[in-house]
């Protein structure tokens, strides 16, 4: 008997779970996706070109708030939870809602969703979004190149545009325009592109894998939020954030990641207290006694330091990290401390959706979230930045907003660079891991 299902997600894991488990599965009929966490992704249709022959009209996408109504409307048997960076408590509230409406509540695991590559795969995951996956991924890239191998980055999906584009291949900034990506997507791709690494993303990760394998020696899976890898991994690195102590056992799938980790990297130890680092280390060891643990400093590098030095500065931080990631501040604020800046509070000057973001995420500090999921939102971000009375703007987002909007003050950009924090050294360990892959 065919079971009717709804997949709840955020335009990423949900589509992958459909592609790998449901697309040609005669035991299920997926009647809808529901969307949450990310704006402007509902009221679309998962296209029939990707949905397959069982879905000639595609699959509609609704807002998650309609879940109970949809369960009743479609007589749904089972709801599949398929997104990440969610508090356990919030996930179980969704489970209760689904069960009360008459459906079962399920999660898919590694066996049912991971694809096998014919090339070595190193996965870089995290306990929360904003932990510093990209920083560690760049350290992995550098190590791979030192032994003469070619890496390719496969990035967790963020398909906010045309869902019919199954594969996106980024080699340069020109490709950002080609695929008309959002600021949030650019944040995840820019550092790798500037480092000369090809980046793949999109909707169908089997097609992506086929193309990536043709041009590389090693695939690096760069996870989104705190999701686990879509690919079966030869080595799994999980980045833990000591600035959010305890989150590794409070959020899904943070705990999953730590339990499957070959290596845990405690990042940002130079900006966290010794006690914070110790607590995170003890927590990870308790979940996974066999994992190897390394510590890394995240050190700020500003491209135009004289623009901000000892100035009144507005900081624009990475959007997802300080919104649903609950990270109060990031690289930008760290840099203002190093360059003796006065941090200017922008909250009273925000307009539109930027103003509403401060209301929705009250833990955000006196920084501006880099939100640009649409052209209208980019305009609101530009207006919010330009409304602030300050000497300079510091972009703590990896996306270079100077190329996206017109900022009416001098602007600099800051990134984190990873460096070993004492012994044992992560860099030495990575060299040994990559050497084994080369054999």
Image (cartoon, helix red, strand yellow):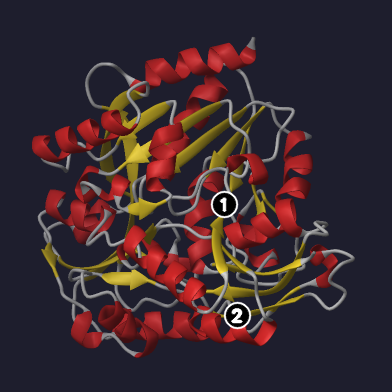
Q: Quadrant of residue 361?
A: bottom left
Q: Position of residue 215 (x, y in %)?
A: 75, 34
Report whether 355 appears left or right of 199.
Answer: left
Can residue 395 be seen at all in this image of the molecule?
no
Report whether 102 appears left or right of 304.
Answer: right
Query: Residue visible at 23% across and 60% down?
Result: 329
Q: Residues within 10 Å of mark 2 (few under 14, many from 20)?
A: many
Q: Nearer the viewer, residue 7 or 161?
A: 7
**CB-based contact (under 8 Å), mark 2 and mark 1:** no
Q: Position of residue 418 (x, y in %)?
A: 33, 35
Q: Position of residue 291 (x, y in %)?
A: 37, 24
Q: Is residue 192 above or below residue 31?
A: above
Find numbered disc 2 in the image and state the secondary structure of the residue it sits on: helix
Q: Mark 1 — residue?
A: 156
Q: Residues within 10 Å of mark 1 (few under 14, many from 20)?
A: many
Q: Mark 2 — residue?
A: 71
| Viewport quadrant of the N terminus | bottom right
Q: Earlier in the sequence, mark 2 or mark 1?
A: 2
Q: Is residue 320 above or below residue 156?
A: below
Q: Position of residue 172 (x, y in %)?
A: 63, 52
Query: Residue visible at 69% across and 40% down?
Result: 115
Find numbered disc 1 in the image and state the secondary structure of the residue it sits on: loop
Query: Residue visible at 40% across and 40% down?
Result: 135
| Viewport quadrant of the C terminus | top right
Can residue 335 be seen at all in this image of the molecule?
yes
């Amino acid at each position: 008997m065919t079971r009717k299902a709804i997949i709840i997600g955020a335009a990423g894991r949900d589509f992958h779970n459909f592609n790998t488990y449901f697309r040609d599965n005669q035991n299920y009929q997926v009647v809808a996706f529901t969307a949450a966490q990310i704006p402007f992704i509902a009221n679309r249709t998962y296209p029939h070109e990707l949905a397959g022959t069982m879905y000639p009209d595609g699959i509609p996408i609704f807002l998650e708030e309609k879940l109970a109504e949809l369960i009743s409307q479609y007589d749904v048997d089972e709801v599949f939870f398929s997104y990440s960076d969610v508090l356990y408590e919030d996930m179980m509230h969704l489970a209760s809602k689904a069960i009360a409406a008459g459906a079962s509540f399920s999660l898919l695991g590694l066996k049912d969703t991971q694809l096998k590559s014919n090339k070595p795969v190193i996965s870089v995951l995290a306990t929360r979004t904003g932990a510093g996956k990209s920083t560690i991924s760049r350290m992995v890239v550098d190590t791979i190149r030192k032994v003469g191998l070619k890496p390719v980055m496969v990035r967790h999906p963020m398909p906010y545009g045309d869902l019919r584009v199954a594969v996106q291949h980024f080699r340069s900034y020109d490709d950002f325009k080609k695929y008309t990506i959002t600021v949030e997507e650019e944040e995840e791709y820019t550092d790798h592109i500037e480092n000369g690494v090809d980046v793949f993303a999109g909707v169908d990760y089997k097609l992506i894998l086929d193309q990536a394998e043709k041009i590389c020696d090693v695939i690096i899976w760069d996870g989104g939020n705190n999701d686990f890898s879509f690919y079966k991994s030869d080595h799994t690195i999980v980045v833990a954030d000591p600035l959010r102590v305890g989150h590794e056992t409070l959020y899904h799938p943070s705990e999953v990641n730590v339990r499957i980790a070959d290596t845990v990297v405690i990042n940002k130890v130079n900006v966290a207290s010794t006690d914070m680092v110790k607590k995170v280390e003890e927590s990870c060891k308790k979940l996974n006694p066999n994992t190897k643990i390394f510590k890394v400093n995240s050190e700020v590098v500003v491209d135009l330091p004289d623009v901000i030095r000892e100035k009144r500065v507005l900081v624009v931080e990475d959007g997802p990290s300080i919104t649903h990631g609950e990270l109060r501040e990031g690289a930008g604020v760290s840099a203002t401390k190093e360059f003796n800046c006065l941090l200017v509070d922008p909250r009273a000057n925000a307009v539109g959706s930027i103003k509403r973001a401060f209301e929705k995420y009250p833990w955000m500090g006196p920084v501006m979230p880099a939100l640009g999921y649409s052209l209208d939102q980019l305009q609101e971000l530009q207006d919010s930045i330009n409304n602030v009375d300050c000497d300079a703007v510091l972009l703590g987002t990896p996306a270079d907003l100077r190329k996206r909007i017109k900022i009416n003050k001098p602007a600099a950009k800051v990134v984190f660079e990873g460096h070993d924090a004492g012994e044992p050294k992560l860099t030495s360990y990575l060299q040994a891991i990559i050497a084994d892959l080369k054999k």
